[in-house]
Amino acid sequence: MVFIIFVLYASFIFFIDTNLLLLVVFLLNLLAMIVLKIKVGEAIQNIVKWLPFILLTVLINCLLSNYEYAILVAIKLILVCNVTYIYSKTTTVRGMAKTIKNLCMPLKWLSVNPDDIELLVCISLSMLPILKREYFQLRDACVAKGMALNIKNTKVILTKLMISVMKRVNEIEESMIEKGYGEM
């Protein structure tokens, strides 16, 4: 239910025409951050990460339309990035996996098991921070060895990362077999 409200709210933002309504949405986002105890500084850092994309969109809209419309689109994108950040901070990996499972329920008619999809999503989302951490460890190790981080050395880093990923996948597989997942 929360996911549907999030999607409707984020979609609604793109249909707003008036500045007053945009201000109301901004205040709602701010209120949600206060109520959910989300740090404003972290939300601003998240928006800064998306700034190149937003500025590119502004530039394209300036070229194709006018600067007023481009600024309006930028404000809408910032608001949507903010509400997405709020949603991601308040939803667990398990909650996101359950949402995907519920969305995939109609696939039961095609003999697709939504529980398997939920498990795959949960494992995938849980692996992302691990992959990120391992990438940075590999990068730091390469820097410590005096390797330059350029296109030539990308193959070495990606090869080691893929080996690490395969080890993790084997660990997960062994764990699932030991727990009896998939047995009849």
Image: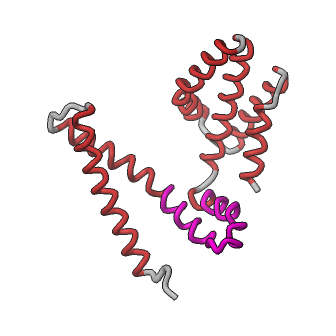
Give x and y (percent) for residue 22: 79, 26
Vertical placement of residue 107 versus 24, above or below? below
Choose top left, top right, bottom left or bottom right for residue 39: top right
Magenta-drawn stretch, dominant element (helix, strand or loop): helix
Residue extending furthest toward the front = 110
Magenta highlight range: 96-125
User: In this image, 16 relative to 70: left or right?
Assistant: right
User: At 44% across and 56% down in the image, what residue appears?
Assistant: 127
Residue extending furthest toward the left = 145
Residue extending furthest toward the bottom = 184
Vertical placement of residue 125 versus 27, above or below? below
User: At 67% across and 22% down in the image, what residue appears?
Assistant: 74
Residue 87, magenta (yes or no) = no
Q: Which of the two residues, 78 or 29, is positioned nearer the viewer here?
A: 78
Residue 109, magenta (yes or no) = yes
Position of the N terminus, as image quadrant, is bottom right
User: In this image, 147 relative to 129: left or right?
Assistant: left
Give x and y (percent) for residue 98: 64, 63
User: In this image, 116 relative to 9: left or right?
Assistant: left
* Total numbered labels: 0
Give x and y (percent) for residue 18: 84, 22
Q: Which of the two residues, 45 or 172, is positioned nearer the viewer here?
A: 172
User: At 39% across and 53% down in the image, what residue appears?
Assistant: 130
Choose top left, top right, bottom left or bottom right for residue 80: top right
User: At 32% across and 61% down in the image, what residue appears?
Assistant: 166
User: In this image, 23 relative to 77: left or right?
Assistant: right
Vertical placement of residue 159 versus 67, above or below? below
Vertical placement of residue 162 versus 45, above or below? below
Q: Which of the two residues, 139 or 31, is positioned nearer the viewer here?
A: 139
For the rendered model, the colour scheme is secondary structure
